[in-house]
Structures are given as C-alpha cells and as structure tokens.
Image: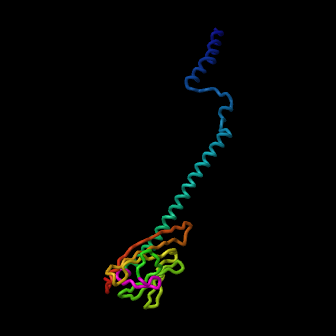
Amino acid sequence: MINNFQNKSAKNQSGFIPHIKNRFGIKPRSGYGSLCAGFTIIEVLVSAFVFSIIAIVVGGLFVQILASERRAFASQKIQENGLFIMELMSREIRVSQIMDSDQNPSGDSPNCTLTELTIRHPVNGVIKYNLLNDVLQRISVDESATTDLSSSTVSFSRLNFCLLGSDPDDNQQARVAILTSIQNKTGKEIVTANLETAVSSRDVQIEF
C-alpha cells in the first residue's frame, strides 16, 4: 500500500506537473543568458550609420527649402519694385513728346543704345530718366528736382531705351522700349531680374 502511494506521488511529480506546465506554455528557466540578450556592436553601428544618413538627407532638404523661400521672397520684392517703376515711367511717356538727347541727336535708337530718355510732359514739363550709381533717377528739368525712383533695397545694373518714330516729320507714332536689370541688395540670396516693357507716345496735351 505504501509502495503504491509512493509510486503515485512520484508519477505526479514527474508526469502531472510537467504536463500542466507544457499545456499552459510555461517553460523552465535555463539561466539568465536568454533573458538578457541585447544588440550587438555591429547592429548598433549599422543603426547609427543609417540614422546619420537620414539626418543628413533631411537636413539638406530643409536647407534647400529655406534657400528657395528666400530666393522667392527676394524675387517678389524685385518684381514689385521694378514693375512699379516701369509703370510710372510708362504712364508719363505715354502722354509725352519724345525729345532729342545729347546721346542721340537724330532721335531714333533702334539698337537700344540710349541710357537716358528725355520727354516733354504736358503738365510736368521736361523730364529726364537716367541711371546713376545703380539708382534710377527721374530729373525734372524745369523744377531742377531729382527723385530716386528705385528703393534702397534694390539696385539697377542696366537701363536702356529703344526708340523708334521720335522724329516729328516721319508721321509715325513714337515707340519706346525700356530694358532694365534689377537685383536685390539685402539678403543672402542675390537674385537678378530682367524686365522689359514697351509703350507708345500719344503726344496729348492733357493727361486724363
């Protein structure tokens, strides 16, 4: 009787309890080596290398975006300033008479070699446009007054006029083409814009 009880106890200890452990997925510990496994040095180095490449690529894209934004902002400022000046000059030329200048006494300049233009406005009198030290100037000859049309944030590197039909005896309408090159003075990104416009003189006496 005692032997049978001992045999059953041994069976329970060797068969029943391991059976329960296996059924519930409980595995016996084999030591701390499998529980404390980590990254190897090669894995850490590879991960750091990949992360560095990603950081460099993202940083380069960010710098390019900032440069493009600064370039677009500078280009916008240049165009706003240049278009305002061109519109101002066109409005005065459109209602004025083209006058001969010292550069070109014959009047016409189809090769765009003129660097200044003189007109006779019906209200403002004789006006001259020229470029001095990268600043576009409007000179009122009758009033002896000089006005800087370009702002301090931009500079004009070129101002040329193409002139056709300025002779009063040729029975042609005077036509003026204005060619300018303008760039910004401030900012890290220096942007240059080439602007061009054409206007025909109506030679009227009153501007309305």
Task: Give above or below for 163 relative to 13.
Answer: below
The percent position of residue 103, horizontal first and vertical second, equals 47, 83
The one nearer the camera, 125 or 190, is: 125
The tally of labels here is: 0
Q: Quadrant of residue 97?
A: bottom left
The percent position of residue 62, horizontal first and vertical second, equals 54, 56
Q: Is residue 125 visible?
A: yes
Q: Is residue 154 visible?
A: no
Q: Quadrant of residue 90?
A: bottom left
The percent position of residue 163, horizontal first and vertical second, equals 40, 78
The one nearer the camera, 148 or 117, is: 117
Residue depicted at 44% across the width and 87% down the height: 140
The one nearer the camera, 133 or 44, is: 133
Residue depicted at 58% across the width and 23% down the height: 22
Quadrant where the C terminus sits is bottom left
- Write down the region rendered in magenta: 92-106
Decide if residue 184 is on the left or right side of residue 118. right
Task: Give above or below for 177 relative to 118.
Answer: above
The one nearer the camera, 79 or 206, is: 206
